[in-house]
Amino acid sequence: MTSEGWGTPPVEPIGQHYIVCGGNALAHRLVLELVEHYEVPVVVLVPDRTRDHAPRIEQLDGVAAVVEYTSVTEEALRAVRVETARGIALVDGSDQENIHAALSAQGHNPGIRIVLRMFNQRLGSNIERLLRNGTALSGSATAAPAFADAALSRPNSVQVGDRFLHIAYDDDIASDRICVVADRIDRQDLGRIRLLPDQEGDSASFVRLAGEFGDGGPIRSATEARRATEPAPAEPPPATGGVAALQTLRSEPAVRIPWWRRLRWRLLDTLRFFTSARLRVVLITALAAVLFAFALLWYLNGNFAWSLYASLLDLAGAAQPDQPGTGDGSGTGGTWQRIAQVVITFCGITFAPVATAIMVEVLASGRRGQHRSPGAGTRDHVVVVGLGNVGTRVVAQLHGLGVPVVGLESDPQARGISAVRALGVPVVVDDGPLAEQLRRARLKHSRTVVAVSGDDATNLEAALEARAVRPDVRVVLRLFDDSFASHVYATLDNVVSRSTSYLAAPAFAAALMGREVLGTLSVFRHVLLIAELPAELGTGLIGLNRHDLEDPGGVRVLAVRMARNPKLYHWNYADRTRTLEPGDSIVVAATRSGLARLNTTLVENT
């Protein structure tokens, strides 16, 4: 036992292994990726064996050792044999702690591959310059787009060149699809889904032709021969079950919100921000009285300019007593005009203290750092439950798209509250019953509830409470447990489930292996990785063709970029026998296991 930690360091000397530092959900998924798909030895450094996901990590087959230290210290790094490791992933702790640990690991092993999780992406980009062989990733930034797109019922997309790849289902699949990425989709039994199923190759028609016209083949007319050479319909959908296909768009799917609705939201939200409900009633009543009195003055005098002049003076408290007589339109006269001036003057007296109260309230709340509450004008918005890393990213992304958002958090010390407040987004902070919090968030007028707290039970409770108030509301849940998510899919309609660690872990694992993942696409609870692999010396890609790279059920080559014209992507490149040359690159869609097998093949080919 040491002063800083204790555990079971590897008894036998170990080398060429990978180290995962952390005991959270992302660490758990990352270890699974490494031991199940990449089949590499893994040593896990956890802060506490008895808490979080550490007990489940210890039970995973393929884990070489689990070592317990409260922090990633020099002693802890020596205990996990960092000097002989091939890579280390830092997926727990604060940004500052991960930076310190990454630099320490590099000091012990200058050639080690380092992947660190950082919330501050700009800082992460700068830190990468300090690491000889390192990458900084954000798990929340990787997963947030999937939650935001699900909340808006629009496809999640990954940009490749000037196109955006997304998943389309069944009737939404167009004729220009790239490939079928899943079939046998059954919401009642998601285990039947096949990812990247076998498809008829581009040369199938030529193979049939050779078989028919080869030795002893039948002789046909020119018309029959032409029909025989016509390509068969690409990837006909299976007889049973749904289908998902990969399609491209020239631009990212837009959020279709009319400009007048956005303007109405802004006006109503601004009015709510500057006034309380009682002050708003006073202001609206006084304003209506002033407008009516002005209209009366204009009607009686017939002189718009003079009526406006007199109204503004009366409103400012510079009212002049009426001199009876003239009636020529150059001054006031008559009982009704005097009444109108009195109304305007007294309303002006009302506006002065109200304006003062508004300014005091705004300045005071700004100094106290108080959050804003949603007002009566908040409608057709998205309610985000849980303002942790993921929730904060989802709120920021939706707000950037112009979609009204309301945050909901039970912990007043949550780090996301200040970040959301800085965006001007209303926040409900309350540790009371969840049903009351949702009511204050104006659930009845919302379009979607996104529950992304760190606890599956809390997220499910939010979904059930939301459905109790509005049975038709769309629900997006963050769930870690796959079995739990399958039951939710089978039980609730209009619900989407995503797992932050499930979306982020493949990207972290690929980065640890030196592969760049452009993004992830979800097919229900399954993940497809979109990666671009450059054919450079030492990568193992040079000399391989599409036949060598593609793996039914695992890897599909989507596009080829040639060295002579690197800006042009050749989608569904027809020449399957052309080998890759230095400077070329390929874009692939792969399952987690498929990308791992491809990585192994490329390593063996180097």
Image: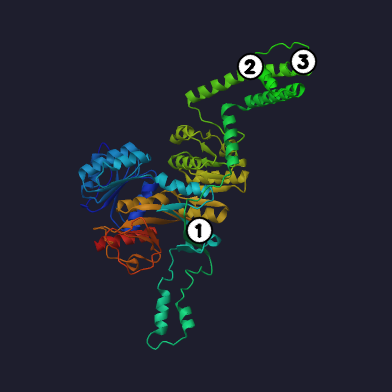
Residue 334 percent coordinates (x, y): 79, 16
Count neighbours of disc 1 (C-alpha within 10 A) and say few if under 14, some if 14 to 19, many if 20 or more: many
Q: Which residue is mark 1?
A: 168
Residue that protrudes farthest toward the front in the picture: 328
Q: Which numbered circle lies on residue 515?
A: none
Instruction: Assign a secondary structure to mark 3.
Output: loop
Q: Which residue is mark 2?
A: 316
Question: Is residue 535 rendered to the left or right of residue 240?
Answer: left
Question: Is residue 566 rendered to the left or right of residue 435?
Answer: left
Q: CA distance from mark 2 to mark 1?
A: 61 Å
Q: Is residue 351 visible?
A: yes
Q: Amino acid at mark 3?
A: Gly
Quadrant (top left/top right/bottom left/bottom right) for the C terminus: bottom left
Please determine whether, in this image, residue 598 is positioned above or below residue 300. below
Quadrant (top left/top right/bottom left/bottom right) for the N terminus: top left
- Which comes sooner in the sequence, label 2 or label 1? 1
